[in-house]
Image: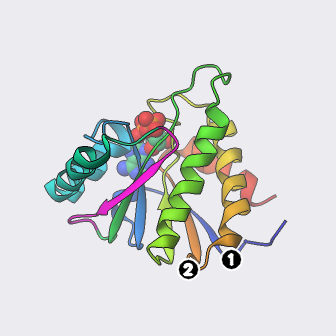
Amino acid sequence: MTDLSGKIKLVQGDITQINVDTIVNAANTSLLGGGGVDGAIHHAGGPAILQECQQIRARQGGCKTGDAVITTAGQLPAQFVIHTVGPVWQGGIHDEDRLLASCYNQSLKLADQHQLTRIAFPNISTGIYGFPKARAARIAVQAIHQNLPQCQFLQQVIFVCYDHENYALYQDILNR
Ligand code: ADP
């Protein structure tokens, strides 16, 4: 596997505070905001983010699970927010693994298309959507390992873990 040790960073904290080109939001298909990290991003970033989400809705009717769209980051330190929709965990037999990997892949692709160099991800689907944390962490790291080397502009991926359990899981996987 390609050695990406210098390109993948792990931090514990609040993604709304992270100063990178783009942060990723664990959104829902409506793109109209919700709880968890979605609520925190809209709250901290202000109404400009929702306005752009509404324009995207008017154009394409929301965002499918596993897909991603990009908007301004409003008042956040980041420049952009990539909204991706993770799968709701339904026991693992409804394509959840592939859909979660797709969130990471599509977000990387979109960031690279916009010529962005640094992207920060929350632990998509591991909150309200109930995806098992260890399984989600393995999928996230694997997706980055597989797709970051193909990116032309992206230089760094930051995993931002809000809770200690996720942080410890990522530490374990990344330090192996
Ligand atoms: P989902 O519906 O995709 O499960 P959630 O927002 O409920 O989305 O949770 C996704 C992850 O985001 C969880 O691990 C949760 O702890 C984390 N999270 C919640 N608030 C923040 C925040 N401000 N910054 C970073 N991560 C956050």
Residue 99: where, in percent of width, then height?
Answer: 59, 39
Q: Which residues are magenta?
A: 65-76
Q: Which residue is at the front of the view, 150 or 79?
A: 150
Q: Residue furthest front?
A: 59
Q: Amino acid at mark 1?
A: Gly
Above-or-below relation of 41 to 157: above
Q: Which residue is at the front of the view, 140 or 108?
A: 108
For the point 32% across and 72% down, the residue is 79
Residue 74: where, in percent of width, then height?
Answer: 21, 64
Q: How would you rate the neighbour count of disc 2 (Cα within 10 Å): few for under 14, some for 14-19, many for 20 or more? A: some
Instruction: Tell me the quarter of the image containing the C terminus.
Output: bottom right
Labels 1 and 2: the sequence-earlier one:
1
Q: Which mark is residue 153?
A: 2
Q: Which mark is residue 82?
A: none
For the point 64% across and 19% down, the residue is 91
Give the labeled residue for mark 1: 6
Front tag of 1 and 2: 2
Q: Which residue is at the front of the view, 118 or 60?
A: 60
Q: Quadrant of residue 128 in the image? A: top left
Q: Quadrant of residue 114 in the image? A: bottom left
Q: Which residue is at the front of the view, 125 or 149?
A: 149
For the point 33% across and 41% down, the residue is 62
Residue 48: where, in percent of width, then height?
Answer: 17, 59
Q: Amino acid at mark 2?
A: Phe
Q: How would you rate the neighbour count of disc 1 (Cα within 10 Å): few for under 14, some for 14-19, many for 20 or more? A: few
Residue 171: where, in percent of width, then height?
Answer: 68, 55
Q: Is residue 15 magenta?
A: no
Left or right side of 81 for 88: right
Q: Is residue 71 magenta?
A: yes
Above-or-below relation of 155 to 171: below
